[in-house]
Amino acid sequence: MARPLSALPPADRSSLGLAFLAGLAALAVNLGLLDLVRRGVEFELSLQLAGILYTLANMAGALAIAVRVGDPLRRLLLLAGWFLFATAVFPSLGFLGPLGALPAAAIGLAAAVLSWRAGLPRPVAPWAVALLLVAVLGLGLLSVAGYQAVEQQTHFFLPEFARLGILHKDPLTFLSLAALIRNGSLPGAVLDGVQHVPYHFGVHYFFVGLAELTGVTTAKAFVVGQQLTAIPLLLFYAALATAELLRLRGEPAPLALPLAVGLVMALPGLVWLVAYYSESSTVSAPLLFLALPLVAAWRPEAVQRPWTAVAGVFLIALVSIVLKVTTALMLLQLAVYLLLSLFLRPSRAAAAFVGLGLLAVLLAAAVWPRLAGVPLTVDFRQAPGFGALGNEIDWAASLVAAATLLHLLRRLVAGAGAGFAGAGRGGGLAALWLLFCAAPFGMVAIGNLQLVTNARYLFNDVILVSGLVMATDAAGLIAWALRGRSARLMQAAYAGLAVLLLGLFLATLEHGRMPPSEAVARTDALVERICAQPGVACPADSRFLTRRLSAESERTIAEATGGRLIEVARELVARGAQAFFVPPSAADVWDFLLHFKPRPIENLQFLPAMTGRPMLLGLPPAARGIPLTMVRGALLGDYGDANRSREINDAALCRHALERRIDTVGIIDRLTPSPRTRLLRCGSGELSGPAEGTDSTRG
């Protein structure tokens, strides 16, 4: 019996094979970089294997669906559903601990068997195209690693930075959320008890599941989860979505996949690289990629049960809220368009979609101030640095216009009806336009949640997916120009084009914010910052970096201020502490927590991130002179002067703790010259009662 793969046209087999190659190459490059940079202090083998096997299982399941399912709309719905299933089920199995490896392995094995029986696709495009794809991934991921070192988010040395207390505020916040989850608590702001905030915590459950499955620290799971799963899967699904666009068009365009992958890496480097260092953006991006061919394949008149299909899109959008709110907003609005198209012709459905969106904006502007008591404002100013809302809008509009012009050029030279086999003449362009129109509507919705600054993510989503649309049209133009040529001439032409495109890709990276020429130096600077900490020993390295970490480095990091504070805090947790209080008199502890200049709040969540227990009265003492505006809003919580650390007796501290459902407080009075701590037990919950007693002081 022939495998389903053999029934596909050669061009489809080749594009799916290139997508598979993209995922494998991205995984191999990041694995090599991770172990090379961390040579001597590699992560546990079980953790790396878990990340590798999860990624392979995810790709195998997707390829099995892509090969076996013939109907385009059903195939794309199943692909999105599989991605959400794999992202939700695998981490939940991790909460079973090592036992979770059994059902996780069974799911992965089933996906592998289905993919093997369907036939693993291999690239049969010109060899130069496959080499171009691998080269683009190698250079791009090296550049991404270097940029992560500059941005200091989810980089290769995140665990060491966290323990030394020099980690960026954002990843430290995410570590604290994950630590709370691992401790069995609902996540939230942690500076005075747990203050629950609306946020997409699904990605943190993913990393915690990986940590629980392998028994490693959460910080290590964050790095491996991002580098060996999330980023390779982002690039794999970008390639797979491009392959699906090509299948809908029914024409060969071998350069489309390396072009798409290159643009997905190069464009963020020119604008905002959040997709490669924000975990939620990385994990949710595949759903946006799959939305392009899904909308392109939407033909209500040809669907047997269109209502079921629309309900499936709504369900996918709603479930995606746990991964990224902005992604869910975009997908929900696409689902609204699909619903409108059941009643109206495509052009009228698009007009109705825009009209409803504008009406929603007007209603929000009129109603929101009355409900919230504050005016609805959106700041379009070019804030310092890239990633500003105005900058994102400019880039999104420019790229959508460029994609439109490229599409019109292709139709002009190749024929208006060429190569759109039942997919609608716009292909992915229609979906791109809809996303661009949806972004401002979603921006108002986010503004109503008082998260206006995060509206830039919506336009950044448009920038990220625009590369796929432009790549299919550009590759289609190239394929049209080379049609009818001899095989030898085709091979030579693609080899020359591969060299030219690789040069352009390299030049774009160098012009942007992640030049490959600086990647090694940036990573080296990251190691140097660790080695520059007092007492940290680092041997010289002659292979890749100037110096590297070693077992001796790990020992000295454990003996540094952060390591000693972690040890003290974990001892208190072992004795029953549910939260920590650091009085103003603990000058050495506050010096460590506030040592960053000029942003002394960067390390404020150190203890919650390392232990999964919140602070009590965890804002800096008033005498430190730190304004509350630095520690207010979003995931940091909403606090006032009453939440600052202050001199307080045990009875009052107990009342404060019990109001937050905490009955045992670990008090850290000092760290040097020897630690002095005590445990305050606050009784059975009576707010008026004094402390039942305290454990003896250490030191």
Image: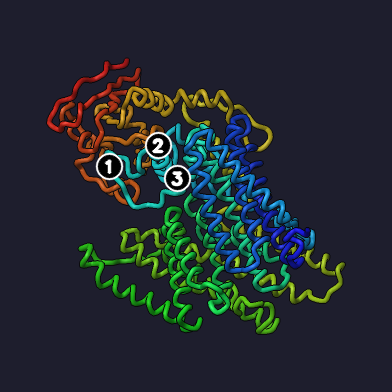
Work out whether 528 lies above or below 384: above
Kind of residue sitting beneath label 1: Ile
Residue at the spot 34% in from the left edge and 20% down from the top edge = 675
How was the colour assigned to the protein in this rendering? rainbow
Q: Mark yes or no: residue 510 visible.
A: no
Give the amino acid type for the residue marked by disc 2 in the picture: Ala
Query: Within 10 angstroms of label 1, few (less than 14), some, or many (20 or more) residues?
Result: some
Please state if 239 lies on the left or on the right of 458 as rendered. Answer: right
- Numbered tag placed on residue 204 in the rendering: 3
* Numbered disc in front, either 2 or 1: 2
In this rendering, position of residue 437 left or right of residue 237: left
In terms of image quadrants, where is residue 650? top left
Q: Nearer the viewer, mark 3 or mark 2?
A: 3
Residue linked to disc 1? 626
Q: Give SS at disc 3.
A: helix
Taking the image as shown, residue 593 lies to the left or right of residue 684, namely right
Q: Residue at x 80, y 68 (%)?
A: 493
Q: Residue furthest left?
A: 688
Look at the numbered disc 1 and give the secondary structure of its residue. Answer: loop
> In the image, which disc is placed on residue 90?
none
